[in-house]
Amino acid sequence: CATRHYTFNIVSQNVTRLCHTKSIFSVNGQFPGPPLVAREGDQVLVKVVNHVANNITIHWHGIKQLRTGWADGPAYVTQCPIQNGQTYTYNFTITGQRGTLFWHAHISWLRATIYGPIIIFPRRNDSYPFEKPYKEVPIIFGEWWNADPEAVISQALQTGGGPNVSDAYTINGLPGPLYNCSSKDTFKLKVKPGKTYMLRLINAAMNDELFFSIANHTVTIVETDAVYIKAFETDVVVITPGQTINVLLKTKPTSPNATFIMAAAPYFTGIGTFDNSTVAGILEYKHLSSHKNITVINPTLPAINATGVVANFTKKFRSLATAKFPANVPKTVQKRFFFTVGLGSSPCPANTTCQGPNGTKFAASINNVSFALPSTALMQSYFFGKSNGVFTTDFPSQPTHPFNYTGTPPNNTLVSNATRTVVLQFNTSVELVLQDTSILGAESHPLHLHGFNFFVVGEGFGNYDPINDPANFNLLDPVERNTVGVPSGGWVAIRFFADNPGVWFMHCHFDVHTSWGLRMAWIVLDGFLPNEKLPPPPSDLPSC
Ligand code: C2O
């Protein structure tokens, strides 16, 4: 195994999109940022140097960070931010993972422009459990605002209303021909006929789940969230923010006299405004038989609220569950949790007018707790035994006032603000049921857990039934993930072993929902053996 060294300079630079030039934050002047490439088993050292006025942290989304929680990155959870002029080196080893993940800023809304792929190849003598692709291409979806995303979210938090929606979706930073003056900013994939390409799809969009499709081509899904799955073919991909999906694209045996549009557009069932535009890219064959009369073929994307398509698609994900790639699913459960996730509102401060529902402020919560980030880092406070006044350990394991989550919500849906956590003994087997609430409308929420992969053992629509639903759980070959879409108007059940000591953030990967409080933290205690303990923080860990 090798050690990979990277330097990420956080800088500002001018970028023009949609005929609009603005200054953005980036890594090394690249937008999207540079790929982090490694093999399974490698140690990775990324020296982050902050040259801008804003505080920064970087998260390695989906990297399990076994015993290296200090390198995880969420601001005020595992670390204090890296301030202007400061440097911090993220140091972790990639254990038991291969595939595609991504890295992104993890403070406020800076990930709108600070993100890039993580590409993990198998160990040197290992091969893919599928045909070796001729070429591999990262395809990273993002969102572009003509305004400064930091201003967009801070204005929303001040007025209590919803943030302005983005002006475009992007593929590898490019909006494509369906947007104003963007034809030259179009992602183009040139392919040879009769070959297999692997597309590494990454949804780095801030607030939207996406449908993705390529005209006249199907793709075969082989991996998600850096875990191989049982391959299946599809003509449309559904990808939530925080998810990554590797697909194989077999090109036509001979160059057709056509170019094919690939496009992504949102899946959305919630209320309020959202960006319902479409990003398009081009799939073009090399050596077209003629350059005249080339037809352009468009894909068909599902309707914006096609929940049925999403459910059918998600159901197909199954882990390989072979001796070489075993699914280590907890068969029995030591701790059960039932979390309601959804929107709500919180009181408007005195002497202000709020643009949220009925004059309140928009909020989002888990079990009615809207999680407040502390002004110091949770994990440092925990490690040095200074939790007093920073966090409590009484996060509710059940909703305090249960109601019909898919019916008419109760009148009082105000949430409380607090920094409450759950404490787990080392290696506890955990079952967590996530239930969408219909307060302010049913909506799918991409829930992301740091520090672990989990198994998606069950899901369904309506209210979760603790008596009958567990009988249908899949404990044999459930998909292993780090981000799962809680179905709109439904629930999902996940299981994992809490075998990684540290403090681990869990949140909705819609940044607007995270900003509104749909987040919490798990504290996993040390085990008895030396390799079951969280080591002390590195000496360059920033302080607040
Ligand atoms: Cu990709 Cu906590 O985030």
Image (cartoon, helix red, strand yellow):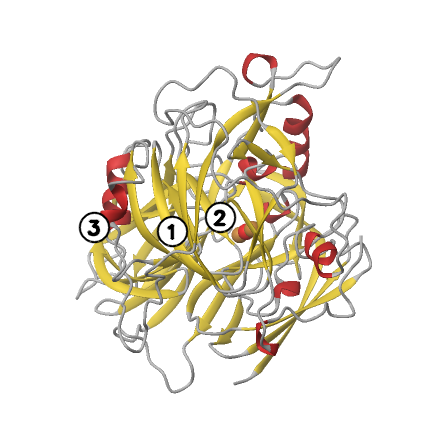
Earlier in the chain: of badge 3 and badge 1, it is 3
Does ligand 1 reach within 8 Å of label 2's beta carbon? no
Q: Amino acid at mark 2?
A: Leu
* Whole-percent x, y for residue 334 in the image: 42, 56
**Which residue carries the number 3 mark?**
216
Extreme left residue here?
253
* Whole-percent x, y for residue 306 in the image: 28, 34
- In the image: residue 10, left or right of residue 167: right
Q: Is residue 278 above or below residue 383?
A: above
Tag 3: Cα neighbours inside 10 Å, few (<14), some, or many (≥20)? some
Is label 2 in a helix, a strand or a loop? Answer: loop
**Which residue carries the number 2 mark?**
174
Q: Amino acid at mark 1?
A: Ile
Do the residues bearing badges 2 and 1 touch, measured as CB atoms within 8 Å?
A: no
Residue in the picture at 34% in, 53% down: 456
**Which residue carries the number 1 mark?**
494
Q: Amino acid at mark 3?
A: Asn
Q: Nearer the viewer, residue 86 or 515?
A: 515
Q: Nearer the viewer, residue 258 or 378?
A: 378
Do the residues bearing badges 2 and 3 touch, measured as CB atoms within 8 Å?
A: no
